[in-house]
Image: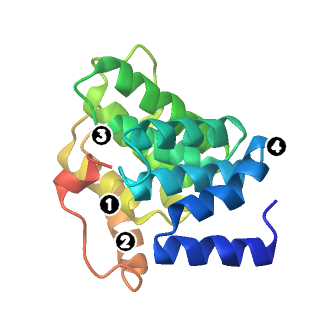
Amino acid sequence: MIKTLLRYRINHCFKKGHYERALELLEPLARKDDAQAQFLIGLVYSNAWRELGEDDAFNAEKWFTRAADNGHRIAQLMLGDLYALDPHRPEHVQRAVKWYLRAHKSGCPVAGRKLAALYLRHRGELDVEINTAGLLYEAADQGDYKAAVLLAWLYKKGICGFQRDFQRFNYWWNKLKQMSKRYPSLPSQNDLLHY
């Protein structure tokens, strides 16, 4: 666990772009399997982007994976996002599914919505069954705005295996109106299925 003073020093390094110093502070903890330190090292490498070396992207993925394997749910979510960005490679889609599932099981509702959206886009290519409705319901009930929009849209259009159902559409549309105080604009349909 990263103590307050150390966290302050690391944040200062991030703000000033002193990535080597941040690594010096984080590596002893990361080598002791501190998931937060491993995650932050991944962030250092992803933010440095070739300032530390040509392998920054590889190192970022390596440290995010170590953090994710140690149960860091934001690292799991970020790995899912990383692999979902390259949907033309089937192995990346499979990896995205794996990490979104782990993040969802770790208690991240956004991962459930992202997993459902990924599955809706690639369901013909995947060899697993995903309960998209259940994931979207759970995420929307926990306040994920995009999940509620996606449910309303799917029920209105009757696509992606969802039956057209105006009663369910109205239910989710009314939920969105209750959320609209926090979210002034609706995401586009394109945004909904692209995480």
Which callout, 1 or 2, points at the residue further toward the start of the chain? 1
Mark 1–mark 2 contact, CB under 8 Å? Answer: yes
Identified by mark 3, the residue type is Leu
Which callout, 4 or 1, points at the residue further toward the start of the chain? 4
Which callout, 3 or 2, points at the residue further toward the start of the chain? 3
Query: Marks 4 and 1, Cα distance to the nearest angstrom?
Result: 42 Å
Residue at the farthest top position: 127
Q: Position of residue 194 (x, y in %)?
A: 26, 47
* Helix, strand or loop at mark 3: loop
Identified by mark 2, the residue type is Leu
Q: Which mark is residue 176?
A: 2
Q: Which mark is residue 32?
A: 4
**Residue 57 located left or right of residue 143:** left
Which callout, 2 or 4, points at the residue further toward the start of the chain? 4
Residue depicted at 48% across the width and 32% down the height: 131
Of 37 and 124, nearer the camera is: 37
Which residue has dot 1 on it? Answer: 149
Label 3 or label 1, whichever lies nearer to me, is 3
Label 2 or label 4, whichever lies nearer to me, is 4
Identified by mark 1, the residue type is Val
Which residue has dot 3 on it? Answer: 85
